[in-house]
Image (cartoon, rainbow, N blue to C red):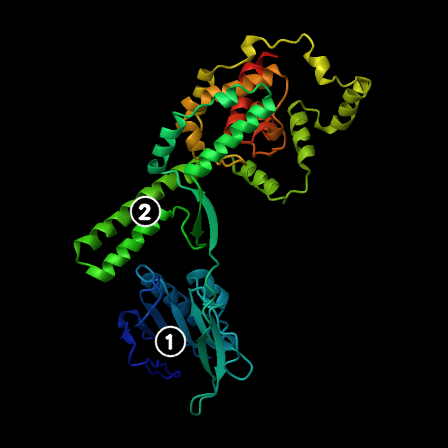
Amino acid sequence: MVSNGGGVCAYINSTIYCRRIEEFENSSIELLWLSVRPKKLPRSVSVILLAVVYHSTASRQTKNVELYSHIQTNVDSFLYSHPEVPITGDFNFRSTGLDPYHLKRIAGLTQIVKVATRADVTLDWCLTNSKVENIYESIQLPPIGTSDHHTILMKAQPSPSKPDNSHIWKRDLRDSRIWPFGRYITTFDWSPILDVHDCDTKYEKFNDTMTMMIEKFFSLERIKVRKCDKPWMTSSIKSAIGRRQKALHESGKNSDIYKYWRNRVQSCIKVARKIYYMRSIEKLKNSNPARWWKEVKAIGCLSSKKKILGILSYFLMMFGIVKNWPKILITFLLPLHHILTLTLDEIQEGLEVPNHYLVDAQQIYRKLSKIKTTKSPGPDMFPNKIQKTFAFELAPVISDIFNSSMTQITFPKALKRSIVVPVPKVSPQRVLKTTYDQYLYHLRSPKLWRIVLWTNFFLKL
């Protein structure tokens, strides 16, 4: 395209498909629009819209506005069906006052040429809506012929290193693995544990037995996880994708085996997305974003407040005395300094635990049946699905350990060593129950103890 102002042209390699888009052109603007489709484009890029422009030094604000509007209209029209847009040319921004930041605001185009194109000024721009600042490098080359503008080469940088793959350890809890475990645990003899009198020994034997069972039937498997994986991606979907690709290469895209695995992959992905939304996204609609972000910062040690001070302040704020809580706390604790600590023998003398503070297997069974399998397990990594599925088999043992702890007025040492501070998930009226989790949350069974203690003991105090 040639005009009195100068003229524009584009050199395209003959091996690259190129089509001129005449309907995008404007007779009053020196600008050439091309649709370019090189081979081996990224999967996300179907075609490249290339515009070559010359903006005369005689142009003023009226011409600038016309060029802004022309670029914005054509880019918006093209982006309905295609994603990538580069625009190159001589914009003469020094004399015309053309603003690259205004182009970025109205059309999302960024200027990526970093070297001088004429003397020591960058008059020739390359505008694109693709985030390629770190992918392409602008290199200054000698002018072509008698031109006073340097030639600019946009050279691709070496491909960034592939993201590091990480590995996680996971237990296979499919039904095919649970069935043999069920046959084993339903016939297992718990009498060696039930016959033990000492609470600590009883719990340690129970913990060792469960660990042995879990490792025997649900051993940890090393799974590769890619950082680019979608959050709903599973190993079964990856396996189906591998089978689909194998069928494509061996039998072709018209074969029945390929069509079967293609449909299987689509179905698995649809189900996985739905499950991920229900488990991880849908519940956020009713959450408190401010409180959620506050707790996330506390977990990541991004908050300057101490956890203990924060908890005490929270309790005292409920009673409207947060300003004077240090004085109130000292006033409360000073009269107690003369009280001597009782020994365990002194406590046990003539003490009997009322029956209504003990639990039966049926009560434990109902609590185990309500365990949420989507929640993460405790530090011992006993899967919640196992404890919920086999609640009937585990309830007698757990109730016996709990009752032994109550009658012996002791707490298993293994549970005392597990102190986990959970993220509060409830309103202030239940904050005491949530705070008590940090002492009892070790696995789902002790968390169950917390629930039983709360309903059978603390509510009756």
SS label for mark 1: strand
The total of numbered circles placed on residues is 2
Picture coordinates of residue 98 (x, y %)? 48, 71
Say which residue appears at 48% left-offset and 31% top-offset.
210
Q: Label 1 neighbourhood size at 10 Å, few (<14), some (14-19), many (20+)?
A: many
Q: In this view, does 419 lie to the left or right of 366?
A: right
Disc number at residue 52? 1
Residue type at mark 1 is: Val
Question: Can residue 141 be seen in the rendering of this structure?
Answer: yes
Mark drawn on residue 111 = none
Residue lying at 79% horizontally and 24% vertically, measured from the top left:
330
Task: Indicate the position of residue 197 as horizontal and vertical percent values.
Answer: 58, 18
Measuring from the top left, give residue 374's x and y in whole percent.
Answer: 43, 35
Query: What amino acid type should be assigned to the residue bearing mark 2?
Result: Ile
- Give x and y (percent) for residue 331: 79, 21
Camera-nearest label, 2 or 1: 2
Question: Which residue, given by chain and number where applicable, does mark 2 sit on?
Answer: 269
Depth check: give the residue in front, 432 or 48.
432
What secondary structure is marked by label 2? helix
What residue lies at 54% left-to-right and 38% top-to-bottom?
A: 292
Quadrant including the N terminus: bottom left
